[in-house]
Amino acid sequence: MKFLKKNLLYTVGLSLVLTACGKEESVDPEPLNFQFVVPDNFPQPVWDTENPMTRNGIELGRMLFYDVRLSGNNKISCASCHDQKLAFSDGKALSSNGVSGTVLHRHTPALINLAWANNGLFWDGGSTNLESQAFGPLTAADEMQQDLFELVDELNNVPEYVKQFDLVFEDKISSQNIVKALAQFQRTLVSSNSRYDKFRRNEPGGDLSPTELHGLELVRQKCQSCHAGELFTDNSFHNNGIDADFDNDQYEGLFQGRFRVSYNPADLGSFKTPTLRNVALTAPYMHDGRFTNLEDVIDHYSQKILVSPTLDKQIPNNGFQFSVVEKEAIMAFLKTLTDEEFVTNSEFSSPR
Amino acid sequence: MKRILIFAFATFLFSSCDDNDDTTDVQPVENAKTTITFDARVGNADFALNKDFTIGSRTYNFSKLRYWVSNVTLIDAKGTEYLIPDSYYLMEEVGDLNLSGTISDSLTYPARKRESIDVEDIPAGEYKSIKFSIGIDAKHNDNLSLQAGELSIANGMSNIAWMWHTSYIFSSVAGSVKEGTTSASFLAETGLNANYKTVSIDFAAPVNFSTAKGLVLNLDITKVIDGIDLIKTPKVNAAQAAVMSALATNYGTKALTFGSLSN
């Protein structure tokens, strides 16, 4: 049996101390420090996980993200369900790609702009940051089913990993350092170069048609109370009226949304707002993938709202009642949020 | 050596940003060390597993007692606080625990009784009180990748899916309870940031750790479960928020008291 190694405590201790002072200390910059570039039209990201990004750390995270060694049967990697060409989603309503082959209960989320996702991960927000979150899919029996001790042994058999972990963390390979590297890579997955972004930044290629502009106006009026701001998500949790009965508490409250984490009755049926960015690539939709295409989603918000006490207050009981022209305009606009550079950027692709 | 130097640097930084700290008065003295024991008891009896205890009208038989003690701080006569570095300790009394399928396909946590922590390099001085917390502070509870003290996801006191919240289990006591013909198997756990409880305990008289070799604090299980009806609510966890909160409050307000000093 192995237990926690304490080799890196001094770094943690030191950063703790720096944080405790409540002000930014200028630490000697490492030559390979990574400068996180915030797109001009985006807010500043905020995360505080004592896991500073470095080029080597990101590269290590990318190696791990695409490595099938991270699954119990050594057949699937993170990328098996988070496919770059689908904006790191999987195109399935509910995946059965896991080691057990069992159909999962929740739809695979797309991985987009996670550096800003600081209000809980998973559809019900049960994980506070990417570092903690990674342990979920890694160990879940129906996902990667990875024995973490075995994983450390497997990676220790790869000299390149031993070298990289030492370089990045000045430490041995550990499950904690594995999730830190994965988190560093995932925070680089910034999508900010859609046609909409170029429009916002007055850049070449940023022209929107009259229909798309009409769609933008409708999205601003009707959708952006939740799909807020330039991130097109408020990173919060809402009941969007796809269900109205949350009495079923099976699977430890699986169908009750955020309530299973907060136990606040106001959160019954609330799920995390996904971003609208790259939404044309991330079908099907909702936490259980119940809507096959965007038309279904728009129809839902237009006239199929199911009313319950926790229905989000911004959604009218009888829906937004979009006309055919309005639906087409919204659809046209949503497609301008597709970021081809994001889904083809070789820095996000498999390193092999 | 490098590690020691960086620790020293960290300590220096810490001192330098604490307004109340008078660093000139706090000199580490070689061999100023002590053992802090958390003596688990059931009323006046010593706590033990697999043994019947009568509490009120009920008979309890415990199979597990585990809780995190964190951020242990000694406070001297002037009010200066000495936070023991990396103080995250898992106190426990358990039989073999089968943790298979948590983070490992096959994993047994061996039977263990642990009631004491050894503390070294205590700055010289007369100490009047101790404070510590039951559970894990929000910063570490929210981030399972942070390594400090005994924090680990390998011992069954963190849970990747505990109540669907990636965090630590702060305390866990399990066993059976019966009253007349009614009985229940119980598992009473606390967790979540709101239930992180800090306990302050004054010493009977000022303590100098260059002579005092042992400090005993008592944890009384009858106080831990006081007011908690484990026949009515045998599973206490986040799904029973009010009961869990009451249980955490018991740890924070009355279960732990000053025991004794040994020289």
Image (cartoon, grey):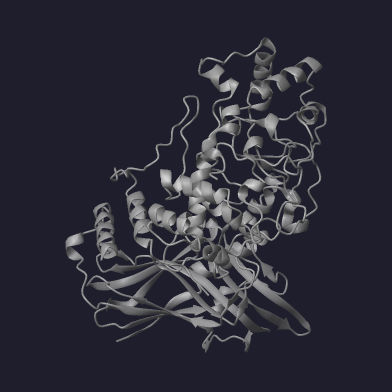
Looking at this view, name the residue that lies furthest to the left. B24
Is B60 on the left or on the right of B170, as rendered? right
Instruction: Give the left or right position of residue B139, taking residue A229 as reference.
Output: left
User: Which quadrant holds the C terminus of chain B?
Assistant: bottom left
- Residue A74: quarter of image: bottom right
Q: Residue shown at 32%/79% (left/top)?
A: B34
Query: Residue A145, image x and y in percent?
Result: 66, 60
Residue B223 image offset from top left, x and y in percent: 55, 76
For the point 27% across and 78% down, which residue is it?
Answer: B209
Residue placed furthest toward the top: A210
Residue drawn at x 32%, y 49% is: A21
Would you say A241 lies left or right of B193 here? right
Viewer can see residue A117: yes
Instruction: Please indicate, yes or no, whether residue A128 appears anywhere in the rendered image.
Output: no
Q: Against A28, is B173 above or below?
A: below
Vertically, is B108 above or below A101? below
Q: Is residue B56 left or right of residue B27?
A: right
**How far from the left and from the top, in percent, is residue A1?**
53, 75
Which image quadrant: the N terminus of chain B?
A: bottom left
Measuring 70% from the left and 13% from the top, which residue is drawn there? A211
Indicate whether B162 appears above or below A248.
below
* Residue B132, horizontal then vertical, whole percent: 41, 67
Closer to the camera in the image, A326 or A140? A140
The answer to which of A166 and A190 lies nearer the viewer is A166
Q: Is residue A33 above or below residue B253?
A: above
